[in-house]
Image (cartoon, rainbow, N blue to C red):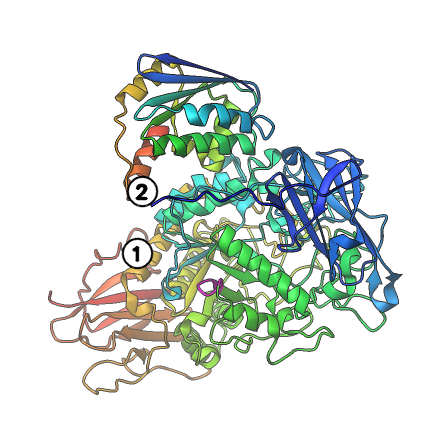
Amino acid sequence: VDIRQQTIGSIRVISLHGDLDGRSSSVAQEQILPALPADGRVLLDLSDVPFISSAGLRTMLLIYRQAQCVNSTVALLGLSDELRGVLSATGFLAFFIVTDSLTGGVEALRAETAGPLEAGRDPARTTELRRSGAR
Amino acid sequence: MTSTAIPNRIDSFPTERIGGFNVRPGRTQPYGATLVPGGVNFSVFSSCATAASLLLFHCGEAEPFAELPFPDEFRIGGVWAMTVFDLDHEYIEYGYRVRGPDTPQLGDRFDPTRILADPYAKAMSGRDVWGKPPNWNDPYPYRSRLTFDDFDWDGDRPLHIQPEDLVIYEMHVRGFTRDPSARVANPGTYAGLVEKIPYLKELGVNCVELMPVFEFDEFENSRVHPETGETLMNFWGYSTVGFFAPKAGYAATGRFGMQRDEFKNMVKELHRAGIAVVLDVVFNHTAEGNENGPTIHFRSLDNRTYYMLTPEGYYYNFSGTGNTFNCNNPVVRDYVLSCLRYWASEYHVDGFRFDLAAILDRDPDGAPMDNPPLPESLAYDPLLRDCLLIAEAWDAGGLYKVGSFPNYLRWAEWNGKYRDVVRRFLKGDTGTVSELATRVVGSPDLYRTRGAIASVNFITCHDGFTLADLVSYDDKHNEANGEENRDGANDNNSWNSGVEGPTDDPDVLSLRDRQMKNAMLLLLTSQGVPMLLAGDEVAHTQHGNNNAYCHDSPVSWFDWKQADENAELLRFVRNCIAFRAAHPVLRGRNHPRGADPTGGWYPEVSWHGVHAWQPDWSPSSLLLAFMRSTPSPQDADHVYVAANAHWEPHPLELPALPPGWRWHLFADTAATAPGDVHAPGTEPVLGDQESITVGPRSALVLVGRGPS
């Protein structure tokens, strides 16, 4: 997988190109996790990711959890129908803001006020469910 | 304070090379394949194998790309273990080849020409997509796979709903949403079930009991019906291939090997909705069948350990399916225990229903034991402490243990006697009222020490007629199963209400509707744990088929259009479940007392008839009325139930309530909708507080309300 990062306004846009699976996920983690901005917003562009395996899903969730640790928010851009279906069926989709366009993602993240890590998980969870529109 | 990072393990490097792979002696525990730093640890058990090797396949390829013999120094006792490094674990499948004696008369059937699946495989491939025609010539049809076990549970835990508060809904994962009328994104899958959680919530059930979800082969014994042309398959799945692996074909993501995640998400979402998950588990036999069946794993790993064998080395068949799992062998007992611990801890499931559980009572020679080790081990296991353990307390070998299953005050049972007497009463058999009275208060004759929560009350289940068919057919009609109607039970205690099968006779149809409501009303006002069969609440029909195990078709699929077409029955059932929830007096753990020890109040259960306080226990009686009351005036509640199986109406004198209290009508199956049932809390007061008429073949429920 090829990973490119750029900053648009205050938003870190990370674009992945190629399959995200067990072969590439460790590279992706090494490049992305340390680079997550504190108190920031991240747009993960998956428009050019044909396939995400089980290991790839875990990489995405690791990114989400690591972002939470540094008080950042993550949105996903460019999910194919198949990938969206896989994420939905396995419950992974519920963790993310999902957007269909770069502009929309930037706006969604700007609208998002990243709050401090919450001790109680349920309120945060409710927000996440509403965000993703997973159900 | 400074923290100390955990150092890299000193065993996370290879010690030698075998077959071109870096390996080291593995860890014998846990059994199965485990992802470890840098590699995969494989551990497999055989009591008397002479040699074993690990086979590695690229996914779907016929030939292995590697076969790694276990060096003898990699064996401790009967356990072979090896860690293999640098495996592309997402893209491989694995299996074993095991050598040993082939002496069937002595119980051993090692066959090194076979490639064996791992009995501990956490995921299996080969049947990833339901119904996709398999490669019949594949020498290794059910393949062990490596998957991740981490999952973000988001704080989920098993629900620990008190047993007396449960309303169980028995369902088939695929059948529930496979029909196009379900209108879900992923029909017939775990994910599809998640989409229907709002329906379950609205219905009011708080526990789903899933028919087998361990990996099985829907193509086992598949065949084309010579007359209908329908492909008949193993739809139900009571024939396990992989005990640790969720059925991949039930996962929308099975083709990507993500069935574990999808299953866990289903449990998580059900729990979030307050719905517990019970699995129907089949430990009485395996998919290997008898000596003519396929060799999948156990037969060539340790045949005489895993199976009950005759002195001649053939398979005992107490399951009716070819073999009998040797559950009380210590090794097999450990296997079953490990499996259930795994599902309880790894998947957060809330309990288990054991298919043909009487087999768990048998010793290795097949004789019933008073103190069988496996049920005892399960009863006392720390990890399973809060899990429901429900026995189907009979088997195909004639062992019938309803009321006497070795229970350690822990096991519940499918109460087959409840089913039988309610059915007989409803169709108008005489001589049933006395037993019916015993059953509706939780069968104290059977469960005196265990309490009412040991009695899982049901009238229908996957085995046998649906409720709609119970009131529409005298006889089974299993011709579509291709066995000339020989299969399936003959003792159905059913009545067609006047016409066999479909009819447009309004009187017959009206009676059938009433009988279904009568059944639901009795079930949901009985003490114990009620269980409904999915689809009965909308009058699902299997067209008289009482053994629809082989139909992946609308015969077995939940028809969601019926939720509209039979909205009246659905509304009735919803309100019955809500009524039960609103009245703890119907749901005690213990059996209600028939006498009032204080003398100044009401018995917890009192019996009535045409005259209050005068039940008719005579053999010719067709009427039962009873009142349930709280044990004291604090938080007082009174519920009166009358069921009339007679074809004539009867006026009933009502028992007097405390001063200022009045009877209100919750349900009357003789009334036309919407007057047949009222939402709990909105019941209208009876104009006549002293008597009410129960209609022909009808039932009614009243609730007493005080001045406040």
On the picture, is B105 further left or further right than B215? right
Q: Quadrant of residue B705?
A: bottom left
> Magenta span covers which residues?
B383-388
Pick the front one: B609 or B36: B36
On the picture, is B570 further left or further right than A127? right
Q: Where residue B123 sits: x, y (%)?
A: 62, 44
Pick the front one: B123 or B673: B123
Q: Is residue B236 visible?
A: no
Question: Mark 2, residues whose alpha carbon is within 10 Å: few (<14), some, or many (≥20)?
Answer: few
Pick the front one: A84 or B422: A84
Q: Chain of mark 1?
A: B
Identified at 48% across, 42% down, the residue is: B151
Q: Quadrant of the C terminus of chain B?
A: bottom left
Q: Where residue B398 sits: x, y (%)?
A: 67, 73
Q: Is residue B193 visible?
A: yes
**Kind of residue at disc 2:** Arg
Q: Chain of mark 2?
A: A
Q: Where residue A25 sits: x, y (%)?
A: 54, 28
Identified at 45% across, 24% down, the residue is: A32
Of the numbered discs in the image, which one, if any, rests on residue A121?
2
Q: Where residue A58 sits: x, y (%)?
A: 50, 34
Of the numbered discs in the image, which one, if any, rests on residue B501?
none
Labels 2 and 1 positioned on one and the same chain: no
Query: Which residue is disc 1 drawn over?
Result: B677
Give the CA distance from mark 2 to mark 1. 40 Å
